[in-house]
Image (tube, coloured by chain):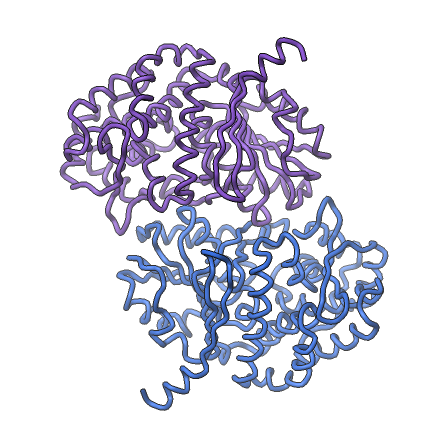
Chain colours: A purple, B blue
């Protein structure tokens, strides 16, 4: 082993998601994509299908395919159009069409190479193709590495709601190659930082302090800082998902900022605001709502907004009007019998899920929209 | 309680499907649909959605809805076009559209009222809507009562293959009301008998004897005979599914006759032959293949064909040509790396799954096609 290889291996870390026979590892490190060791021990099959998009394919698909060719007789690739606007049934069907056209059987392993949209669609395709084939998440964005690739939530959007059609379906492995973040546009890096920041207020107050000390280094893509942040986020998410895989209770706290955020995404049209941007502005509103309900200590909203701003993210939502926000929030999946349920901060590092009076919610929206 | 009611209750039987936290009861009897006791203990929710079709809705939807109104605040109904030709994404989407338009939340209980197509689509919609809501199977055809409503297989067809997109998703309960068989056309009753007959050769030789003694009574819809047949089929299926929920091995034996049958359905165009009719002719070919491979005793094919004929079912497939049969069979879900895997009778009452030489398969096709 030459010194360069040993350096690569030394930075590799594992986080386990413990879900009985559906348990799996998240591998985090540099140089993972092109390292044969990354891909050992996956389910055997004749076919592998790499699902990626037009942006990621030219950057990383060849490297992944050459590794997979060592263990799968046929390695196929389907390249989807890029963006949240394409997270629909028509695009999903491109994956099914290709799987069937290539004669892929029900042992076929699907590899999701890309960001959250690719992961959600490839994962849902894996959940449904012949009633379920194995899949591997290879997230190439920060947002996907810290959040969407872990925990088995897969879905496509419906014209009447985001992520409305989907499945809980766990991957066989998650491979987070830090090198893939080098090609990520700044706007996407910031969007990922929104989900990183989220884990502080809901679960880990010291991590929020750490983020305040290291935000500049994270934005300049210091690999050691990114590795620490990704590992910590994955650890928290793995723990939450291990306790509540199907979001019967606890898992809903991971949606902090997402109820307001979904209203922004739906109200503006999917893809106009990035998911992370909408979540960022949504967290400010949710923090304020937590304060107004007397759950969070006074000052949380300002503190969080300052960090969100330093991450290069919006702290104010678009001026859709409180009525429209509320209308979109009522079709959120956390709603029950028409009651919107909010993730609220109940003391720093702890979250609760509960409804709130419309008037108070409207006040938060008015206070934090452009 | 008046004597009529006591008679109704005395004929009620339960078969349990044992799958840890996904266990559920199959209830078999007369007068179940209109009996409040049938619907006790289902998951609580604000919304119930009855999924049915244009044929079944006028017969039974009102009776079911009035029972459900006692425990769900809002009871909705979506009526799908009838038939296998509509078992596709477009029709599935009618269910999602309606669920979202009605503001159905993720506790909503879906009721599949109809035959196998309704059950497969409503079940798959339940598996995917907001990543999974509870559902109840209320099969109104013999085929659905003895086979498709039990065991959690849900799916829609893809232009390139039957049941290619779906999920393993267990119902909360299965309610088989024998009275609903009274309105079933003779052709549909016979199609259901194909799946009934199937259980004999694969799992229960004495049941095959019983069917030979009682086929005429079954075709004249003797309720006691139908109740016995349905219970026995459900018991066998529940046992197999309890051992192998996701068809990793044993469960595949339930597809006896289905590999040839799928080729008939695909080759003729979905819906031209009823599923049960295709399975009937398929079982004759599969029995012959079992004999030619020296697995089944000589005479099985003739014995089975005679019973199938007495059930009012075809014993010969359409003349598509062996080449086309083989082509369609290669995209069967049981295929692995291009090898077609057949369910074969290995001594009466026992089945195995294995590949077979193309030439032998072709000979069976030629021998049993019109």
Percent position of residue A158, x then y: 41, 43
Left/right placement of residue A334 relative to residue B315 reads left
| Image quadrant where one finds the C terminus of chain A | top left
Report the front residue among A15 and A198.
Answer: A15
**Farthest bottom residue in view:** B3
| Residue shown at 39% from the left, 29% from the top | A271
| Image quadrant where one finds the N terminus of chain A | top right
| Residue shown at 45% from the left, 40% from the top | A155
Residue B258 placement: quadrant? bottom right
Percent position of residue B139, x then y: 48, 69
Left/right placement of residue A195 relative to residue A336 reads right
| Residue shown at 34% from the left, 25% from the top | A277
Residue A267 placement: quadrant? top left
Percent position of residue B161, x then y: 63, 51
Report the front residue among A74 and A151.
Answer: A151
Report the front residue among B212 and A118.
Answer: B212
The answer to whether residue B54 is seen in the rendering is no
């Amino acid at each position: 082993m030459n010194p360069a290889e040993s350096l690569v291996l030394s930075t590799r870390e594992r986080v386990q998601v413990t879900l009985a026979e559906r348990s799996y590892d998240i591998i985090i490190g540099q140089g993972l994509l092109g390292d044969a060791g990354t891909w050992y021990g996956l389910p055997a099959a004749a076919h592998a299908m790499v699902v990626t998009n037009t942006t990621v394919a030219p950057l990383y698909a060849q490297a992944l395919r050459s590794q997979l060719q060592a263990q799968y007789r046929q390695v196929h690739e389907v390249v989807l159009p890029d963006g949240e606007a394409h997270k629909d049934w028509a695009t999903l069907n491109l994956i099914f069409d290709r799987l069937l056209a290539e004669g892929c059987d029900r042992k076929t392993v699907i590899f999701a190479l890309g960001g959250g949209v690719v992961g959600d669609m490839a994962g849902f395709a894996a959940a449904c193709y012949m009633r379920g084939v194995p899949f591997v998440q290879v997230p190439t964005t920060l947002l996907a590495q810290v959040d969407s690739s872990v925990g088995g939530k897969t879905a496509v959007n419906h014209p009447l709601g985001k992520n409305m059609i989907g499945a809980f379906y766990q991957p066989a492995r998650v491979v987070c190659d830090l090198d893939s973040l080098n090609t990520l546009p700044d706007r996407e890096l910031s969007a990922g930082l929104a989900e990183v920041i989220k884990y502080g207020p809901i679960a880990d107050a010291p991590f929020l302090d750490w983020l305040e000390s290291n935000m500049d280094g994270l934005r300049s893509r210091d690999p050691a800082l990114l590795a620490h942040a990704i590992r910590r986020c994955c650890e928290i998410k793995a723990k939450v998902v291990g306790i509540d895989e199907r979001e019967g209770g606890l898992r809903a706290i991971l949606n902090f900022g997402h109820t307001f955020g979904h209203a922004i995404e739906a109200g503006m049209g999917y893809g106009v605001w990035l998911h992370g941007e909408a979540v960022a502005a949504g967290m400010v509103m949710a923090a304020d709502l937590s304060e107004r309900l007397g759950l969070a200590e006074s000052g949380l909203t300002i503190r969080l907004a300052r960090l969100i701003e330093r991450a290069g993210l919006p702290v104010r939502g678009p001026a859709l009007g409180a009525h429209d926000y509320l209308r979109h929030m009522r079709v959120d999946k956390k709603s029950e019998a028409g009651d919107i349920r909010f993730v609220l901060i109940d003391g720093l590092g702890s979250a609760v899920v509960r409804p709130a009076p419309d008037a108070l919610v409207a006040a938060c929206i008015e206070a934090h929209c452009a």
